[in-house]
Amino acid sequence: MKAKEIQELIDFISNSGLAEVKIETDEFKLSIKKNSEVPAAKNVENHYSQAAPAPSPEPAPKKDAPESNENSGPPLLEVKSPMIGTFYRSPNPDSDFFVNIGDTIQKGQTVCIIEAMKLFNEVESEISGKIVKVLVDDASPVEYDQPLFLVETQN
């Protein structure tokens, strides 16, 4: 299953009266359990214990209006969140970030992880270019389609 299909399934379960769904095929097993008693932030603190409370992220620039001082440069595109969840810049608290400002990324390269319902989903870039800004703090909640990174495309 792709991340988008998993997100659609999560949305469907959230809107239905179902408390638990299990899907099993030859290729994978997926179990989703709705647990409204434990807030998601508490789960994140258990996984990412050294993460300090994150300040609220800066408002993300719109795709059509990149930062004013860069209007004459190469176009800036956004890498967006494919789902609702918690944004992590590294695979675990002791590891280096997947990408940093100034890094050149390739299409298909993993740039972060989004945790949704105890599932860790790698987010791959759909564009190639250079990371010019990280728009979300590590261990912060993100929404579907929220910009995560600004990337300077290479023409």
Image: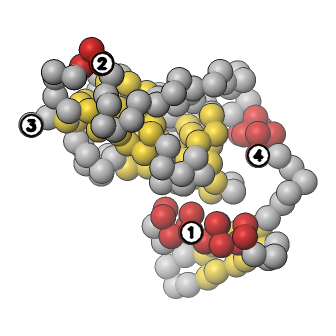
Q: Residue at x 26, y 33 (%)?
A: 76
**Residue 18 percent coordinates (x, y):** 79, 76
* CA–CA distance in space, label 1 to label 4: 19 Å
The disc, 2 or 1, on the residue closer to the chain's N-terminal end is 1
Residue closer to the observer: 19 or 109: 19
| Label 3: element kind | loop
Asked if one can make out residue 95 in the rendered structure from this viewpoint, the answer is no
Q: Is residue 32 above or below residue 45?
A: below
The disc placed on residue 68 is 2
The disc, 2 or 4, on the residue closer to the chain's N-terminal end is 4
* CA–CA distance in space, label 2 to label 3: 20 Å
The disc, 1 or 4, on the residue closer to the chain's N-terminal end is 1
In the image, which is nearer the foreground, mark 2 or mark 3? 2
Q: Residue at x 20, y 33 (%)?
A: 75
Q: Residues within 10 Å of mark 1 (few under 14, many from 20)?
A: few
The disc, 3 or 4, on the residue closer to the chain's N-terminal end is 4
**Residue 125 percent coordinates (x, y):** 33, 47
What kind of residue is marked 2? Ser
* Circle 3 residue: 155
In the image, which is nearer the foreground, mark 2 or mark 1? 2
In the image, which is nearer the foreground, mark 2 or mark 4? 2
Quarter the C terminus occupies: top left
The disc placed on residue 8 is 1
| Label 4: element kind | helix
* CA–CA distance in space, label 2 to label 1: 36 Å
**Proximity of marks 1 and 4: CB atoms separated by less than 8 Å:** no
